[in-house]
């Protein structure tokens, strides 16, 4: 695929999918993503769908043998194109599928670049056991190693959970590899510039001292300037150890600051995790079992939204009537205007009914709606958000999730499948 073809098909996307704006919005539908080009659902479990900016391209991982390169034993990473209806293998090198598991995809805003974790021995630097980070370019068809030293040696320990910036220029990931800044005991975060082909340790103090605890679960803004992550490292500001705090790294200044705070500025007094950041870098979502972030009492994990510009924190996991979730909620993602937050919940009073479900909170209208639902409105079974950050488009029109529900499209076989729902506005 040439670059000019990507541009041309992007224009077609606007026409075919009605992504031009709210005026063209149709009734929301739940659509199957983990399917072969023929339309047949994946014949094994699929997980972790993540969206390009428009929602046209969706990356996901799957064990399915009826998807390209699948053998039913190893996980592979795919990208589904909603315009052409084609599902293509991403976890490949020199045209050959990875010989080990590949998973945890993250996709750039235009859908061209996909980062992922793999143990494949036929990938550069792969040994069949150690997790490494790779980026696949869907235009050049090349897959390259990212978890490597300046000299090109692969990480000498596990690296995982990558996130790629929306502009496709920066990848951040967690690593245990001593030759990449990890200690082997505590995970550290590393950032790699794909254009400059240079990597550096992210989880460190202004003086250059590595974090003295674990830092993981990163998410990155569109420009790659901002990264949010979990940390329990006291020298990075997490002085409530052993509880994690959510930290924000600014690539421009090199500064790390704690953002899991109340509107009054107090650090969360419980464990904070599952961070995410909007494409424009203004909004951060996270979950916490704290008592000082709002009306929740700390009994359960709740979903929160932090406005970095106004330094305000608001509770997200509540019903349209204002009732606080009566069980765990988390794994949120937020639109660029901060209005829409998609998150998962086990709370019965929010509609979970014994299974995790996916909800959308409209902060402007104070409404909470079920997303993991069939055409009749009934909830699916065991629906989860991806660990990847792009599970809602920046405009808030589409959300993605995976679920095991026989009443959802393609779910009759009993396998976990991946879905997209929208347009929502």
Image (tube, grey):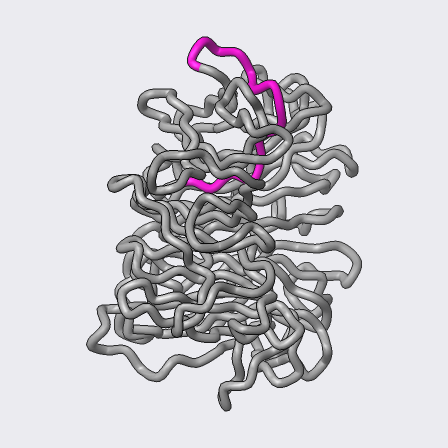
Res 105 visible: yes
* Residue 237 percent across, percent down from the top left: 49, 24
Give the vertical position of 51 relative to 349 (above or below): above
Please state, as top left, top right, bottom left or bottom right, where the N terminus lies in the image: bottom left
Residue 186 found in image quarter = top right
* Residue 143 percent across, percent down from the top left: 56, 41
Give the vertical position of 60 relative to 268 (above or below): below
* Residue at 54% over, 73% down: 349
* Residue at 48% over, 70% down: 420
* Residue at 55% over, 85% down: 378
The residue lying toward the viewer, choosing from 82 and 173, is: 173
- Report the number of numbered marks: 0
Q: Can you name the residue that lies furthest to the top here? A: 207
* Residue 360 percent across, percent down from the top left: 42, 67
Q: Can you name the residue that lies furthest to the bottom here? A: 376
* Residue at 28% over, 70% down: 365
Q: Which residues are magenta?
A: 206-220
The residue lying toward the viewer, choosing from 23 and 285, is: 285
* Residue 161 percent across, percent down from the top left: 59, 41
Secondary structure mostly seen in magenta is loop
The residue lying toward the viewer, choosing from 225 and 126, is: 225
């Amino acid at each position: 695929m040439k670059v000019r073809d990507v541009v041309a098909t992007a224009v077609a996307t606007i026409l075919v999918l009605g992504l031009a704006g709210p005026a063209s919005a149709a009734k929301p539908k739940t659509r199957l993503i983990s399917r072969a080009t023929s339309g047949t659902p994946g014949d094994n479990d699929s997980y972790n769908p993540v969206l390009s900016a428009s929602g046209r391209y969706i990356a996901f991982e799957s064990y399915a043998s009826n998807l390209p390169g699948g053998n039913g034993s190893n996980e592979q990473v795919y990208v589904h194109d909603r315009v052409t209806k084609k599902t293509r293998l991403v976890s490949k090198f020199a045209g050959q599928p990875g010989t080990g598991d590949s998973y945890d995809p993250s996709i750039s805003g235009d859908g061209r670049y996909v980062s992922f974790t793999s143990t494949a021995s036929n990938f550069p630097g792969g040994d069949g056991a150690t997790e490494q980070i790779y980026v696949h370019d869907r235009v050049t068809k090349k897959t390259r190693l990212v978890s490597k030293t300046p000299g090109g040696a692969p990480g000498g320990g596990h690296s995982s959970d990558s996130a790629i910036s929306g502009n496709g220029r920066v990848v951040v990931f967690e690593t245990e590899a001593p030759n990449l800044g990890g200690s082997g005991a505590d995970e550290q975060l590393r950032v790699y510039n794909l254009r400059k082909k240079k990597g550096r340790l992210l989880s460190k103090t202004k003086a250059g001292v590595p974090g003295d605890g674990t830092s993981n679960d990163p998410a990155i803004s569109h420009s790659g300037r901002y990264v949010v992550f979990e940390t329990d490292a006291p020298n990075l500001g997490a002085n409530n150890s052993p509880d994690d705090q959510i930290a924000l790294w600014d690539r421009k200044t090199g500064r790390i600051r704690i953002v899991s705070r109340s509107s009054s500025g107090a650090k969360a007094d419980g464990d904070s995790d599952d961070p995410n950041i909007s494409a424009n870098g203004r909004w951060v979502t996270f979950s916490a079992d704290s008592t000082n972030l709002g009306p929740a009492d700390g009994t359960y994990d709740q979903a929160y939204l932090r406005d970095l510009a106004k330094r305000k924190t608001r509770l997200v996991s509540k019903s349209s009537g204002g009732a606080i979730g009566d069980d765990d909620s988390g794994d949120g993602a937020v639109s660029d205007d901060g209005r829409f937050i998609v998150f998962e919940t086990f709370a019965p009073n929010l509609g979970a009914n014994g299974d995790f479900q996916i909800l959308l909170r409209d902060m402007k209208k104070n409404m909470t709606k079920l997303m993991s639902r069939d055409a009749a409105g009934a909830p699916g079974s065991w629906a989860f958000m991806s660990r990847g950050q792009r599970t809602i488009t920046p405009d808030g029109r589409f959300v993605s999730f995976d679920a095991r529900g026989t009443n959802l499209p393609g779910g009759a076989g009993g396998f976990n499948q991946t879905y997209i729902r929208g347009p929502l506005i």
